[in-house]
């Protein structure tokens, strides 16, 4: 009997950012909350189940970064917090705060989040980690948690998202 090894699956390739300029146009080490291969986080938000889901989703097997709670002896890289503004369409906003020991923010807009079902709130939380937006339409369409339309993307990183995360973090 002759046995053949299965054909290896084709590795996903990173997808380009859809923004042409600004912080949403690149994915580099300097454009993320990752510090020394990890994100140390704190939270002052009512959306605990949602950020816990996002932390688990991005801590997939084989991930090159760790997402762990901040401790008394570590530097906080990211804080989850809430705000409410009906004039802003976004349900979640990631903000890079430059400077030594600066803490980046993921801010959940209660004016939007409170109107969503739990599954959509999980999608928002998984989306808001600071990677650039990907295209879900046209010739460059990809399946990505980073597609900007909240109702159409998955609630966990796809193979494309993992490839994009691997690009700056190896």
Image (cartoon, rainbow, N blue to C red):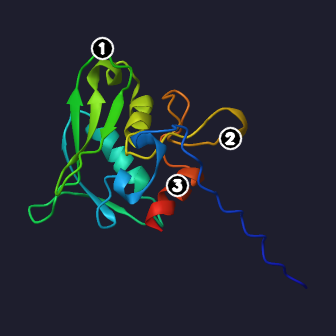
Picture residue at 71% right of the left edge, 64% below the top: 9
- Residue most extreme to the left: 72
- Mark earlier in primary sequence (2, 1): 1
- Which residue occupies the foreground of this view, 142 or 17? 17
The N terminus, quarter of image: bottom right
- Residue most extreme to the top: 87
Q: Position of residue 37 (x, y in %)?
A: 34, 66
Picture residue at 31% right of the left edge, 14% below the top: 87
Q: Position of residue 102 (x, y in %)?
A: 18, 51
Q: Are marks 2 and 1 in contact (CB under 8 Å)?
A: no
- Determine whether the residue tagged by mark 3 lies in a helix, strand or loop: helix
Picture residue at 31% right of the left edge, 62% below the top: 38
Disc 3 target residue: 164
- Residue most extreme to the front: 21
Is residue 88 found left or right of 73 in the rendered image? right
| Cα separation between marks 2 and 1 | 32 Å
- Mark earlier in primary sequence (3, 2): 2
Is residue 130 found left or right of 15 in the rendered image? left
- Residue most extreme to the right: 1
Q: Position of residue 131 (x, y in %)?
A: 44, 47
- Mark earlier in primary sequence (3, 1): 1
Image vertical order of residue 116 relative to residue 47, above or below: above
Disc 1 target residue: 86
- Which residue occupies the foreground of this view, 29 or 170? 29
| Cα separation between marks 3 and 1 | 32 Å
Disc 2 target residue: 140
Q: Nearer the viewer, mark 2 or mark 1?
A: 2
Residue 30: quadrant of the picture: bottom left
| Cα separation between marks 3 and 2 | 15 Å
**Disc 2: CA contacts within 10 A as few (<14), some (14-19) or many (>=20):** few
């Amino acid at each position: 009997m002759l046995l053949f090894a299965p054909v290896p699956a084709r590795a996903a390739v990173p997808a380009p950012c859809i923004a042409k300029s600004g912080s949403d146009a690149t994915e580099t080490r300097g454009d993320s909350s990752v510090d020394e291969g990890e994100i140390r986080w704190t939270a002052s938000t009512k959306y605990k189940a949602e950020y816990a889901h996002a932390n688990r989703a991005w801590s997939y097997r084989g991930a090159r970064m760790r997402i762990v709670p901040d401790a008394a002896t570590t530097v906080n890289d990211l804080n989850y917090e809430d705000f409410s503004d009906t004039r802003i369409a976004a349900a979640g906003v990631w903000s890079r705060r430059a400077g030594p020991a600066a803490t980046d923010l993921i801010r959940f807009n209660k004016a939007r989040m409170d109107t969503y079902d739990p599954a959509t709130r999980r999608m928002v939380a998984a989306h808001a980690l600071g990677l650039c937006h990907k295209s879900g339409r046209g010739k460059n369409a990809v399946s990505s948690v980073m597609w900007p339309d909240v109702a159409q993307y998955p609630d966990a990183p796809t193979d494309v998202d993992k490839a994009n995360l691997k690009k700056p973090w190896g």
